[in-house]
Image: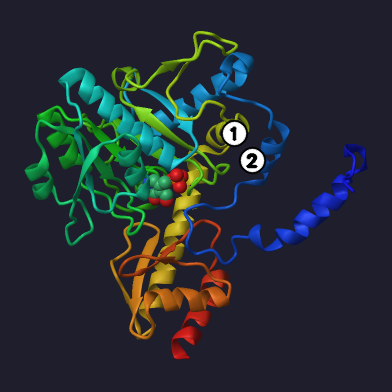
Amino acid sequence: MEKSVSDIDQNTILKELKKRLAFEKSYSKVLSSMCTPPLEISRKISAEYAEINLGDPGLFPETKQMELEALNSIAEILQAPMGWTGSITSGGSESNLLGCWTARNWSKKTKGIKNGTLLLPESAHASFEKSIDILNLKSKWIPLTSENKLNLELLKEELNETTVGIVGIAGATGTGACDDIKALSEIAQDSNTYLHVDAAHGGMIFPYLKDIGREAPVFDFQLEGVCSITIDTHKIMGGLIPGGSIIYRSSEFSKTIAKGITYLSDSTTKQITITGTRPGNSVIALWVLLKYYGKEFMIDRVKKSFVLTDYTAEKLRGISSISLTFDPTINIIGFTNTKLSNENLVAKLKEFGWDLSIYSNWTRMVIMPHFSIEMIDKFIKDLENVLKE
Ligand SMILES: Cc1ncc(COP(=O)(O)O)c(C=O)c1O
């Protein structure tokens, strides 16, 4: 017989959940994810402000203002010029879809391009495959150089009057490589082509590299040809999951996708997101991260990840059956081994509780701020054992 609502005992439910999800709450053996546990304060904010819906900003004007302030901080990180626009999104996939949608609509509006082609590197994230499908775009996937960057010469061969946009990646998912965004910007400017930069992962890393004494590629709005940038807040920054953003150089671009929604509390609301109803709690938590934790917090997180990446790479180089696939440029490591197939190795390590990613020719690790030396040492020991078997 079904229980009535008054019979439901929350404590029993919470206890059951604790038991069932005990192993899902920890990132202690996750070596494959660009996500990382959010701060305690973000968790509290998440619970406290769960009912806020930024899809209806007229009902929550103060949260809307905080969203603008958070976007302003992100626009500053990306050196956006006056007149920038943008939105907080559900993450890199939504931001990339928005970037492609805008490229398509802007190219149609300003140049009359219909059924156009998007040019993007073979390293581009799967979210672009989704975007191309949803937006009914044609696509040309441009091969990479030996440094895993978009091959500029091959791109130039494909660029023509049917091109709706170029995509450059600042921090590729598989290798961490940053395309030559400066060169792409010049190509985009010379040909009056929309350039979207996917900095979902690298966007919160590259701006802090100089502060930790490392070389930093330029990928942001300092480059005049860059029209929009994806940058995630749930990756190395550690914002609530999911969370991301897109910043546009100007409303000239974003207004081509804006939709008015008259039934909302503020009937003049125009949305430039895919989602309608959107969580306010993650925006408030992000605002707190940006306002109270800010630059020093990010420098610390990036530094920690980079020091641990160097440490892990060194340990891997010390195993004779392992070769690094590329010299890590950010906190992403790829390696191959001479003993087991990529799939087998990942499956065996899973038996020890470790999670790694399978790429076409390498095993991938993403070294996030939740890692520690002890965690890496434990992993290396298990890896050596698996390779010895
Ligand atoms: C470069 C890049 N772009 C986009 C995405 C998609 O982001 P999300 O999973 O937040 O949708 C990822 C995810 O790893 C990524 O690495």
Residue placed most toward the observer, 327 or 50 = 50
**Quarter of the figure with residue 246:** top left
Location of residue 177 in the rendering, given as x and y in whole percent from the top left corner: 29, 54
Does the rendering let one see residue 205?
no
Specify the amino acid type for callout 2: Ser
Instruction: Judge whether 11 appears above or below 363 on screen.
Output: above
User: Can you say whether 320 is above or below 268 in the image?
Assistant: below
Left/right of residue 305 with respect to residue 98 in the rendered view: right
Q: CA distance from mark 1 to mark 2?
A: 8 Å
Q: Label 1: which residue?
A: 288
- Vertical side of 90 occupied by 152: above or below: below
Q: Is residue 286 left or right of residue 2?
A: left
Q: Quadrant of residue 44?
A: top right
Q: Are marks 1 and 2 in contact (CB under 8 Å)?
A: yes
Residue matched to label 2: 42
**From the Cβ of disc 2, is ligand 1 less than 8 Å away?**
no
Q: Which mark is residue 22?
A: none
Q: Earlier in the sequence, mark 1 or mark 2?
A: 2
Q: Residue at x 37, y 86 (%)?
A: 339
Between 260 and 385, the one nearer to me in the picture: 260
Residue at 42 percent across and 23 percent down: it is 272
Label 2 residue SS? helix
Dot 1 beta carbon under 8 Å from ligand 1: no
